[in-house]
Amino acid sequence: MKYLTEYRNLADTKKYLSLIEKTVTRPWNIMEICGGQTHGLVRNGILDLLPEKVRMIHGPGCPVCVTPLNLIDKAIELLENGVIVCSFGDMIRVPGSKKSLLEAKSNGGDLRILYSPIEAVKIAKENPTKEVVFFAVGFETTAPANALSVLHAEHEGLGNYSILVSHVLVPPAMEAILDDELCNIDAFLGAGHVCAIMGFEEYYPLAKKYKIPIVITGFEPVDLVHGIYLAVCQLEKGVHEVKNQYTRVVKPEGNKVAKEVIRKIFEVGNREWRGIGEIPNSGYQIREAYKKYDAETKFGISHMKAPENSDCIAGEILRGIKKPNQCSQFGKKCTPYNPLGAPMVSSEGACAAYYHFSNN
Ligand code: SF4
């Protein structure tokens, strides 16, 4: 399959691993931002094949993992009060403060698992006497489709559709990680799918301010080892530039049409990240002109708060300070079958990647 098979090629993967081995002279910590990259590294055994001097640190780029507990509680509150709640499948087993969406569904809630928010608009049209809410979770990648669903609902004249927004942005999170006094990151692998939407021009000031190389990569083995090689080359030469390994998908300016749809519905605002706390200007919120599609405003649930589970160190894992197997609950009280935190549930969660694919 073009653009896929050649990036799973063993000979090319070995070639870049060998180049990394020949190039690296001292220890470097490289953070891959995205949970998809983490899974690619762990699932393909790349962590075990890299030279010891190259240490991969797993970043916060799992949208399910960083969705605050209180938003899960809010979705459950709606579900238990007769609202049809629609969600991507990843969210439904993530524990809220008392239960998960799946448990609330088993108590009779009308929870629909969808692949696209546009399907939720269709459900709203088919159920005019019911309120329908789409749980709009994600990074910049899913924002265009969620914004489009609002435009679609407006076009259809639907008054019973809204979205529960938990959209987070990558560059402010990178900056928060770099500002953390415990930060030991020397370079980043940027998330290719986020940059497919947003481009990578906003990374230039970050690379310059923090003197840190940033390489945008894809998710296949060759993408990842090629990206690591480009980062190691920069680190060894003492340069800090933004490089695009994922040229088959990412353009510097991103997708202008998608960005315009996002801009129409959302504006940038402060956002809470699960396990990390509030990061200034790190998320999207619905613009005033479209507030009637904002489920938190519509149902008066903005005030709801929820304490984190003190046994779960997801915040330290998402900031790259600890690895999943350094959590005392990993594989003991916390497994994919009985998760204590979101990183053990999500298909992009670092704890789930270690549980399923790593011997470490
Ligand atoms: S192993 Fe479980 S408890 Fe530990 S950080 Fe991961 S999700 Fe949280």
Image (cartoon, rainbow, N blue to C red):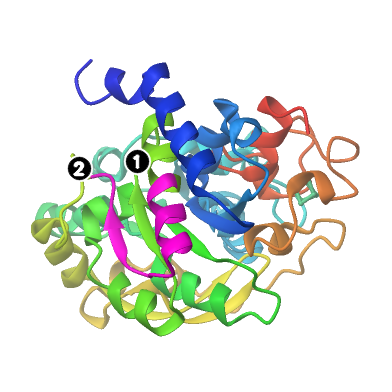
- Among the 4 quarters of the image, the one containing residue 274: bottom right
Q: Residue at x 53, y 79 (%)?
A: 279
The quadrant in which the N terminus is found is top left
The quadrant in which the C terminus is found is top right
Q: Nearer the viewer, residue 151 or 13?
A: 13
Q: Amino acid at mark 2?
A: Val
Q: Is residue 231 one of those drawn in magenta?
A: yes
Q: Residue at x 42, y 18 (%)?
A: 10
Image height of 67 relative to 40, above or below = below
Residue picked out by circle 1 = 218
Residue 307 x, y percent position in the rendering: 77, 69
Q: Secondary structure at mark 2?
A: loop
Whether residue 49 sits left or right of residue 83 in the image: it is right
Can residue 197 be seen from the camera position used here?
A: yes
Whether residue 196 sits left or right of residue 214 in the image: it is left
Q: CA distance from mark 2 to mark 1?
A: 8 Å
Whether residue 80 sits left or right of residue 133 in the image: it is right
Circles 2, 1 touching at the beta carbon (< 8 Å): yes
Residue picked out by circle 2 = 249
Residue 105 x, y percent position in the rendering: 61, 37
Q: How many marks?
A: 2
Q: Amino acid at mark 1?
A: Gly
Image height of 344 relative to 241, above or below = above
Task: Pick whichever of labels 2 and 1 is earlier in the sequence.
Answer: 1
Q: Residue at x 48, y 70 (%)?
A: 174
Residue 95 x, y percent position in the rendering: 71, 48
* Label 1 crowd bin: few (<14), some (14–19), many (20+), radius 10 Å: many
Q: Residue at x 71, y 75 (%)?
A: 182
